[in-house]
Image (cartoon, grey):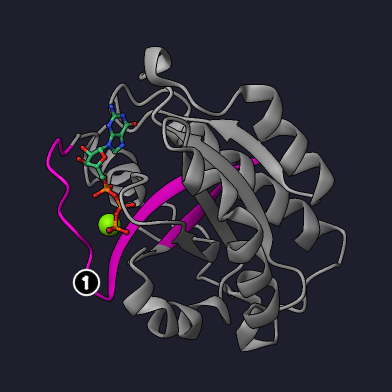
Amino acid sequence: MSGYEYLFKYIIIGDTGVGKSCLLLQFTDSRFQPIHDLTIGVEFGAKMITVDKRQVKLQIWDTAGQEAFRSITRAYYRGAAGALLVYDITRRETFEHLAAWLTDARQHSSTNMTIMLIGNKSDLKHRRAVSTEEGQKFADDHGLEFMETSSKTAENVREAFEKSAESIYKKIQDGKLDLNSESSGIKLGSAPQVAPPEEGGCGC
Ligand SMILES: Nc1nc2c(ncn2[C@@H]2O[C@H](COP(=O)(O)OP(=O)(O)OP(=O)(O)O)[C@@H](O)[C@H]2O)c(=O)[nH]1
Ligand SMILES: [Mg+2]
């Protein structure tokens, strides 16, 4: 039985080619896809994590970064509790587009969406075009959390999802999210399922 106590809906956004789909694949399947498999519209992934000893299911929408799909992406903001806003540390223009992404996200999401800024491809240090300090400063200036990740080596990938889930969980504890509203991006699941001991088994 894979019961969960909470379900958090996530959206992954950012320019084409920054590694959104790879980030999701590394998180859900622990695999890396070296070829750019352009996302058309929206793809979907899910994974169970533990937050404060509770089972939390993350339901993740991986959107297409290409401009042509922007209106489809906008339809997925509402109803997301968390967003990963991704840029590529080796392509400066993907960093320069962050402000526009953020405007879009804030305009189309519910008010209290938790946004984490992700500087992806941290394994490509020799090709770095955006410093860690610049990423951190953008995050600080806009009230975002920040992490650099690599979908290739898996560095910080699980941590990025977990850290933002912890922030969402804290907002729930602090009464800052309206769980009754569909647009909060959060669902309450069934209580944790404790399996009965097997007949005759000692459980050892
Ligand atoms: N070295 C390195 N390459 C990466 C990393 N993440 C993604 N890539 C590569 O970058 C390319 C694009 O990755 P995708 O995940 O398909 O990019 P995307 O953001 O989903 O792009 P769209 O679906 O078009 O929006 C692929 O060739 C990946 O192999 C990373 O952390 N390190
Ligand atoms: Mg993609």
Tell me residue 189's x, y (percent).
52, 70
| Residue 124 seen in the figure | yes
Q: Is residue 90 above or below residue 104?
A: above
Q: Is residue 38 above or below residue 70?
A: above
Mark 1, Cα crowd under 10 Å, few <14 / some 14-19 / many 20+, is: some
Residue 46 on the magenta segment: yes
State the quadrant of the N terminus. bottom left
User: Where on the image, by quarter, is ligand 1?
Assistant: top left
Q: Is residue 78 left or right of residue 61?
A: right
- Which residue is painted at 30% across and 60% down in the image? 45
Rendered image quadrant of residue 102: bottom right
Q: Nearer the viewer, residue 167 or 23?
A: 23
Residue 95 on the magenta segment: no
Range shown magenta:
33-59
- Which residue is painted at 21% across and 71% down in the image? 40
Mark 1, residue position: 40
Rendered image quadrant of residue 69: bottom left
State the quadrant of the C terminus. top left
Q: Nearer the viewer, residue 196 or 190?
A: 190
- Which residue is painted at 20% across and 34% down in the image? 32
Q: Is residue 12 above or below residue 69?
A: above
Q: Is residue 107 left or right of residue 200?
A: right
Q: Nearer the viewer, residue 13 or 94?
A: 94
- Amino acid carrying label 1: it is Ile
Tell me residue 145's x, y (percent).
70, 42
Tell me residue 191's x, y (percent).
54, 65
- Which residue is painted at 73% across and 42% down in the image? 139
